[in-house]
Image (cartoon, rainbow, N blue to C red):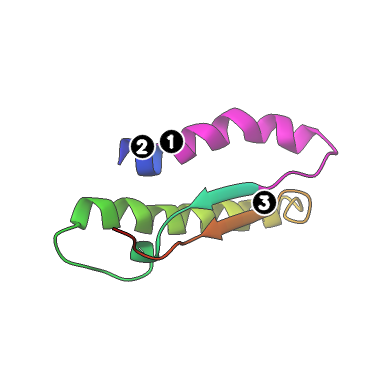
Amino acid sequence: LGVNLLASFHLARAVLPAWKASPRPRCFLVTSSVMGLVGGARMVDYIASKWGLVGFAEGMRLELARDRLSQRIPVVLLCPYVVR
């Protein structure tokens, strides 16, 4: 959870204040997994962190839209398929 989920919170806290103050367009990329969209067995901790990233991306998207910043700072959610 610390790496998969909390790192994104820390990164957002570190960069968003400067990004909001700057007129330069940016993009916040959140890398989750297809396992963040569907469940699975024997991977509960991984799946929970990836589901959390999906919610995090949606929340970020809504907050930036509320602040009228979503066109300048879009949030992109990447959910790659399962690999070995």
Left or right: 45, with 15 as reference point: left
Relative side of 46 to 23, left or right: left
Q: Secondary structure at mark 2?
A: helix
Disc 1 and disc 3: Cα gap in Å? 19 Å
The structure residue drawn at horizontal position 54% and vertical position 58%, both measured from the top left corner, is 77
For marks 1 and 3, give the one nearer the viewer: 1
Identify the amino acid type marked 1.
Ala
In the image, which disc is placed on residue 7? Answer: 1
Quadrant containing the C terminus is bottom left
Camera-side residue of 65 and 24: 24
Q: x and y percent of residue 65 in the render? A: 69, 57
Q: Which residue is mark 2?
A: 3
The residue most toward the bottom is: 38
Query: Is 11 placed left or right of 15 in the picture?
Result: left
11 on left or right of 19: left
Q: Is the C-beta separation of discs 2 and 1 under 8 Å? A: yes
The span from disc 2 to disc 1 (Cα, nearest Å) is 5 Å
Q: Indicate whether 13 appears above or below 47.
A: above
Q: What residue lies at 38% left-to-right and 68% top-to-bottom? A: 37
Q: Earlier in the sequence, mark 2 or mark 3?
A: 2
- On the image, numbered disc 3 is attached to which residue? 64
Is 82 or 40 nearer to us in this picture?
Answer: 82
- Mark 2 is surrounded, within 10 Å at the Cα level, by few (under 14), some (14 to 19) or many (20 or more) other residues, namely few
Is 8 part of what is drawn in magenta?
A: yes
Segment colored magenta = 7-27
Q: Which mark is residue 26?
A: none
